[in-house]
Image (cartoon, helix red, strand yellow):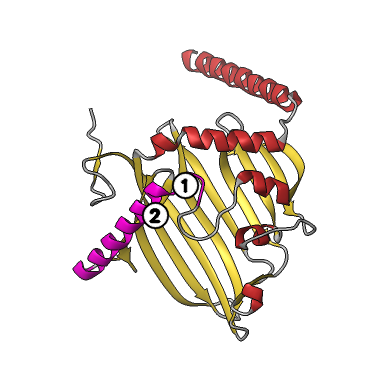
Amino acid sequence: MYIRNRSRLLGCCIAFSILLLVAGGQEAAKAPLPDIRQLMREVQEHQKQLDQIRENYTYTSYQEVQDIDANGQVKKTESSEYEDFFVNGHVIERKVKANDKALDEHEQQKETERVTKLVEKAEKTPRGQSIEGPSISISRVLEIMDVSNERRELYRNDPTIVFDFVGRKDVKTHGLAEDASKKLQGTLWINEADRQVAHLEVRFDDNFRMVGGILATVQKGSSFRFDQSKVNGEIWLPTGAEGTVQARLLLFKNLRQHFRERDYDYQRFKVETQQSKDAKIAPAKKP
């Protein structure tokens, strides 16, 4: 009798909870969607506000690249493991393993020299600007893209605002990043509560010729996806990425690659000495 009544009570609680969730979902669905351009400005502003917290974190990034032949078979696989951390809003990657083997002493020395230079450059480069390669601002991306099909969806059980985008072919652009943006289309998931990018899917809907097509042409269909999650209830960090690139190099060589990235082992740390000198990082002690 006790078990039966307890089960009945549990069933009533579950049913009531479902009703509340449905009602809450209906209320959220009725709420008007925000202006997408204003939403992305809020995302950018929230990102800036979290920069200081982000610089207290380090995590491991495992990256794998596969060379694919014309029949879709894997010809070669290479992997790298990195320790990622942030300096002045810029992510810095320190390589610690190649093909699952730790770097030898000489390789470690070269990597330390490379990372030290990157840290120094990051400290001098304003937040929001790339320290390696061309960059493009959120406001400029919004000028280049047409946005459509705004909607709400649950992503990993969290309410998100979702929209599709496609590059406008008629927009005048300058520089590699802007030129490439015109050739893209995809979908973006924004966590509604935290105003953070939860998921991104993007692909080239046309061939993209770099340096007049003489050096390389990224072919139509090349695609990329990216994920972030909330860590320790305070900061959003990458959890992984995946993509396929098809390109033609130097007019005669075809390149087909598939890459995967997995990010994990997030740790808070404290900086014991200036990162620009030796980038010595120690995990924060637990209370």
Magenta segment boundaries in residue numbering: 104-129
Q: Which residue is mark 2?
A: 61
Using residue 287 as the reference point, say whether residue 132 is left or right of it.
Answer: right
Q: Secondary structure at mark 2?
A: strand
Q: Residue at x 59, y 52 (%)?
A: 136
As for residue 112 lying within the magenta part, the answer is yes
Give percent across and percent down for residue 124: 40, 48
Q: Residue at x 72, y 63 (%)?
A: 205
Instruction: State yes or no: discs 1 and 2 in contact (Cβ < 8 Å).
Output: yes
Q: Residues within 10 Å of mark 1 (few under 14, many from 20)?
A: many
Question: In the rendered image of this protein, does residue 39 appear above or below residue 17?
Answer: below
Q: Position of residue 79 (x, y in %)?
A: 39, 66
Q: Secondary structure at mark 1?
A: strand
Observer able to see residue 111: yes
Question: In the picture, residue 24 is in which quadrant?
Answer: top right
Picture layout, residue 141 above or below residue 230: below
Image: 276 above or below 184 = above
Q: Which residue is mark 1?
A: 238
Amino acid found under the numbered disc labelled 2: Ser
| Label 2 crowd (10 A; few <14 / some 14-19 / many >=20) | many
| Quadrant that contains the C terminus | top left
Q: Which SS type dominates the magenta stretch?
A: helix
